[in-house]
Image (spheres, grey):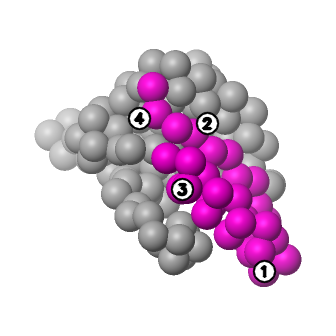
Amino acid sequence: MTKIEEAGADIVVYENCSGVREKLELIDETMDNPIDAIAKKYLNLSCSVMSPNEKRFRDLNTLMDEYQVDAVIEIVLQACHTFAVESTKVKKFVTEKKRKPYMYIESDYSMTDVGQVSTRIEAFLEMI
């Protein structure tokens, strides 16, 4: 993400496992059974391991509108196969439904691909 900002872009929302997506819905503290409330929250996540995962696309739609997203750079950890598989649907959603530029980056978050990732990000930003 640092490389995106260094290339001159502003990251307005981070829709990933540790991003805003997991905080869109809080645990319902009014439920009688707190264990049921916690289970309901976690079973309703828009994570790529949940199937079907239409909620992720509803949330993505809302986030893109709310944060006025100009383009999407999807960064997927090489070990996260479910996000990698779902990236085709995300690309289709972003480019066809939202009509926004999209770029997919798969990385192991090591320093070995920093140069390649930086070059791709810079080229993507120049195109938009």
Q: Which residue is mark 3?
A: 125
Asked whether 118 or 90 is in front, the reply is 118
Query: Left or right: where does residue 113 sit relative to residue 26?
Result: right
Q: Position of residue 86 (x, y in %)?
A: 67, 32
Sooner in the amino-acid sequence: mark 1 or mark 2: 2
Tag in front: 2 or 3: 3
Of badges 1 and 3, nearer the viewer stands 3
The residue under label 1 is which amino acid type? Met
Q: Which residues are magenta?
A: 99-128
Q: Amino acid at mark 4?
A: Leu
Q: Please state the horizontal and vertical placement of residue 54, each as a whole percent of the image.
A: 49, 21
For disc 2, the neighbor class at 10 Å (few under 14, some 14 to 19, many from 20) is: many
Q: Which residue is mark 1?
A: 111
Give the image location of residue 6, x and y in percent: 51, 77
The residue drawn where x is 61% and y is 63% is 122
The label number, if any, that marks residue 60 in the structure image:
4
Q: Which mark, residue 50?
A: none
Label 4 vs label 3: CA separation?
Answer: 21 Å
**Earlier along the polypeptide chain: callout 4 or callout 2?**
2
Query: Which mark is first along the chain, 3 or 1?
Result: 1
Mark-to-mark CA distance, 1 and 4: 29 Å
Q: Nearer the viewer, residue 124 or 90?
A: 124
